[in-house]
Image (tube, grey):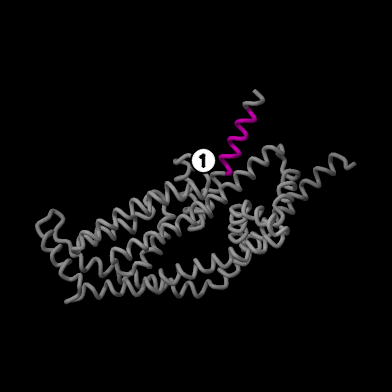
Amino acid sequence: MASSGQRHALAVSALIATTALVWLSRPVASGLFLGTLLAFSLLTLHERLSRRMRSPQLAALVLAIASALVIISALSVLSYFVVERGTVAANSVVRAFDPGGPLREVATRMQAATRDSPIGPIDLSARLRDAAATAAARLTTWAAALASVTLNTALMLFFTIMTTFFVLRHWPAIMARTERLLPLHPAHTRIVLAEFQLVGKEVFIGTLLTGLTQGLLAGVGYAIAGVPEAPLLGAFTAICSLVPIVGTMLVWVPAGVLLAIVGHVGAGIFVLIWGALAVVGLCDYVIRPKLVGGQGHVPSLLTFIALFGGVEVFGLMGLIVGPVIASVALALLRTYDNAMRADA
């Protein structure tokens, strides 16, 4: 049996080893984190597939490869529509306000109608031309940036898929070892790990998959209404679904209002109704609860703090990291509170 001093020395050495591993994994931390959350969202499916294939390792491999194909396809489609088609659409808007363009007359009428307003005439043509020109320039810059980060993206995707396979294949062993290593009661450790697993399911299935569904439904609505560049607007709708509070309304509300302003009142009303019923109502109140298996368990105030604070600290990744940290922290606080009440 080791002495008390030897056990303490061993504990310090284990802490140093863990710190060293975390420090070494920093360059690929995003891939490891995303892969873990993705695996959590696939654990139930992995159990079913393992029983059918009679091989947990083969089931994990199939799910990892399928996840890679889905992620690559989704990123490729979004990049194409947002960058390539977005640049074309922005340049088309600039030309539409040129003399003789389809939007020139609308801008002239608005400027005349607001000439006597307290804020003065609104030169819609100049403002939208400047905004479209700026958007075209930024999208061109994004295209160059995408080309330069291809290697980093491929590296992150590689570690995401590898982590997904590893967690799916060894999750029972990971749970058992975590219960032994963490200085917590095993029941408390299981509660925290269960919360971590639930958050992974909510992020990947509840948020990302619902966002893609919202983009698809919105694109169908834009196409039915005859909106130009309907696939591009559908892609923007999917991206904006990640924005707190307003979400997809950032796209379909301006699209419907603009259609009504340019004279297509029926199409504009259709887009607004479609967005409210299909994009928001169906997805948020029917599809998302079905995918996740229940309503959110984190208070709304804490959710907003996690989203905005996560973006401020971690950038765009904060939309995923923030809610995960908030949920796990809340689980620890609830576990501590329950333990204290049990002792009392």
Q: Is residue 263 left or right of residue 342?
A: left
Report the residue at 20% width, 72% height from top.
102
Q: Quadrant of residue 67?
A: bottom right
**Residue ID for mark 1:** 297
Q: Is residue 337 magenta?
A: yes
Q: In the figure, is residue 173 to the left or right of 28?
A: right
Figure check: 113 above or below 330? below
Magenta includes 123?
A: no
The single residue placed furthest to the front in the displayed view is 52
* Residue 318 locus on image (x, y percent): 50, 54
Q: Amino acid at mark 1?
A: His
Question: Looking at this view, is 150 or 65 the one in front?
Answer: 65
Relative to 23, residue 8 above or below: above
Residue visible at 73% across and 59% down in the picture:
55
Residue 101 position within the rendered picture, expressed as x and y whole percent measured from the top left: 20, 75
Magenta region, main secondary structure: helix
What residue is at 48 percent from the left and 58 percent from the top?
A: 316
Q: Residue 266: image x %, image y %? A: 22, 59
Quadrant into which the C terminus falls: top right
Q: Is residue 239 left or right of residue 106?
A: right
Left or right: residue 270 versus residue 79 is left
Residue neighbourhood size for the residue with mark 1, other residues' Cα within 10 Å, grouped as few (<14), some (14–19), many (≥20): few
Name the residue furthest left. 116
Q: What residue is drawn where x is 59% and y is 65%?
A: 66
Q: Nearer the viewer, residue 156 or 42?
A: 42
Residue 136: give x, y in percent of width and height: 34, 72
Assign a secondary structure to mark 1: loop
Q: Which residues are magenta?
A: 328-340
Residue 42 occupies quadrant: bottom right
State the quadrant of the N terminus.
top right
